[in-house]
């Protein structure tokens, strides 16, 4: 596999319109409540206090000061939220079933596999792997990862694993053989470029019972996970601290991150799900799976991002409130053509191209396109959000 591009991390921050952006990848997408509180205070001390959950279940701190890089990196490593090796940190893009270890319907031991794969990635023998190497380890269960693409997909079963590489190669083997086999397949891949990522599945929200709607013979003891979604993945530091409190008050004291910009609290008693939902809503999280904004993707946009042509996040919230239920989703609302929030195509993509005197954005709209293509082949141009909503609600398509 050839080296192509990079993802921002603690050793390789990215310059964004609102300062430096640092992506934090908690191992196995989980962090203890104490670590979450430490991260919230790091975001306030060294950044703007803005924290995002990314599409692929990482966290990113925004508005970080350049002078704080060394202190922040040291604090993250001390909190167990970053590795010591910059090369490993780049390639440590392993998405594992977020409820592994708690959801009894998950097959095998995906967490052990994720740890073994991360350990093997540290071997210098794999130094030539792409810095954008990615793996998905899916044990099924109540929150399967079937809609999420990666260079290497490992499907865990009770009797072994199936491995599928992005170039179409597949094999089956024992779980203990999987890390070596997966990295051998990855090293042989000769993809010039990765195909565009498909639109992400809708994020889960609310209570997810481990055994479905039937609570079984002891309904009072039924358990599940609870999915909380910050609007468009965006939080301020106090929201992350509130998540830590909720995980201790209602779950096992750990936060789990799921793709789709979701935070999970595991081990929640069904009888307490209503109380948790109320507390989560009070803290600013979405808990209703039918919430209109869940079908929209939006970057931070103007004015917080200096590179933004339109206030995408505020406009996406306005658009969600105007759209009819039947409009196809996901809808990507981007502050400019860079498309930071989603790199692939979406059923509807709105790319910001300017602003009106009242501050609202103007957008080019294209169907089944990514932001980089909207400028070339927009189906409708220079729409306000109200015009875009009216057009989508009447089922308009290409001109
Ligand atoms: S896509 Fe959004 S976040 Fe990225 S540069 Fe443009 S406005 Fe800023």
Image (cartoon, helix red, strand yellow):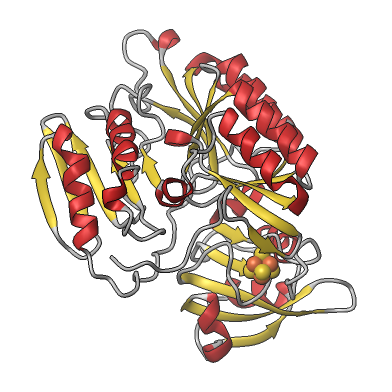
Q: Is residue 216 above or below residue 377?
A: above
Image quadrant in which you'd find residue 13: bottom right
Circle count? 0
Q: Quick one: which residue is furthest to the right in this view?
A: 357
Give the residue drawn at x 59%, y 71%. 393
Q: Nearer the viewer, residue 216 or 306?
A: 306
Where residue 70 sits in the image (x, y, percent)? 67, 44
Give the residue drawn at x 36%, y 8%. 218
Question: Does the rendering let one see residue 4?
Answer: yes
Q: Nearer the viewer, residue 127 or 242?
A: 127
The picture quadrant for ligand 1 comes to: bottom right
Q: Is residue 201 above or below residue 355?
A: above
Question: Does the rendering let one see residue 165?
Answer: no
Where residue 143 sits in the image (x, y, percent)? 37, 37
Where residue 19 sits in the image (x, y, percent)? 75, 58
Q: Which quadrant holds the N terminus?
A: bottom left
Where residue 107 sits in the image (x, y, percent)? 23, 29
Give the residue drawn at x 55%, y 18%. 253
Q: Is residue 235 above or below residue 316?
A: above
């Amino acid at each position: 596999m050839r080296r192509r591009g990079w993802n921002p991390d603690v050793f390789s921050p990215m310059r964004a319109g609102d300062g430096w952006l640092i992506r934090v990848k908690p191992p196995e997408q989980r962090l203890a409540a104490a670590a979450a509180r430490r991260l919230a205070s790091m975001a306030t001390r060294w950044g703007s206090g803005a924290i995002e959950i990314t599409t692929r279940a990482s966290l990113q701190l925004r508005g970080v000061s350049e002078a704080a890089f060394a202190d922040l990196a040291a604090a993250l490593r001390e909190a167990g939220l970053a590795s010591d090796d910059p090369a490993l940190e780049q390639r440590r893009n392993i998405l594992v079933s977020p409820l592994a270890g708690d959801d009894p319907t998950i097959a095998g031991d995906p967490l052990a596999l994720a740890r073994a794969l991360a350990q093997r990635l540290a071997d210098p023998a794999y130094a030539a792997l792409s810095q954008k190497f990615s793996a998905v380890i899916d044990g099924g269960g109540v929150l399967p990862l079937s809609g999420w693409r990666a260079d290497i997909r490992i499907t865990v079963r009770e009797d072994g694993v199936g491995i599928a590489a992005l170039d179409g190669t597949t094999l089956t083997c024992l779980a203990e053989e999987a890390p070596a086999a997966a990295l051998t397949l990855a090293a042989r891949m000769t993809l010039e470029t990765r195909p565009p990522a498909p639109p992400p599945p809708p994020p889960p929200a609310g209570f997810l019972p481990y055994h479905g709607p039937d609570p079984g013979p002891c309904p009072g003891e039924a358990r599940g996970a609870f999915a909380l979604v910050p609007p468009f993945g965006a939080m301020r530091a106090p929201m992350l601290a509130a998540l830590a409190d909720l995980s201790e008050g209602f779950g096992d004291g750990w936060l789990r991150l799921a793709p789709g910009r979701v935070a999970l609290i595991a081990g929640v008693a069904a009888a307490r799900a209503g109380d948790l939902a109320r507390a989560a809503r009070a803290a600013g999280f979405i808990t209703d799976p039918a919430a209109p904004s869940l079908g929209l993707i939006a970057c931070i946009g103007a004015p917080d991002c200096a590179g933004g042509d339109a206030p995408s996040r505020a406009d996406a919230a306005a658009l969600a409130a105007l759209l009819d239920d039947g409009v196809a989703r996901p809808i990507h609302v981007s502050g400019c053509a860079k498309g930071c929030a989603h790199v692939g195509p979406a059923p509807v993509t709105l790319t910001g191209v300017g602003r009106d005197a009242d501050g609202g954005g103007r957008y080019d709209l294209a169907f089944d396109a990514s932001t980089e293509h909207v400028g070339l082949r927009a189906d409708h141009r220079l729409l306000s959000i109200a015009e875009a909503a009216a057009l989508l609600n009447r089922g308009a398509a290409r001109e």
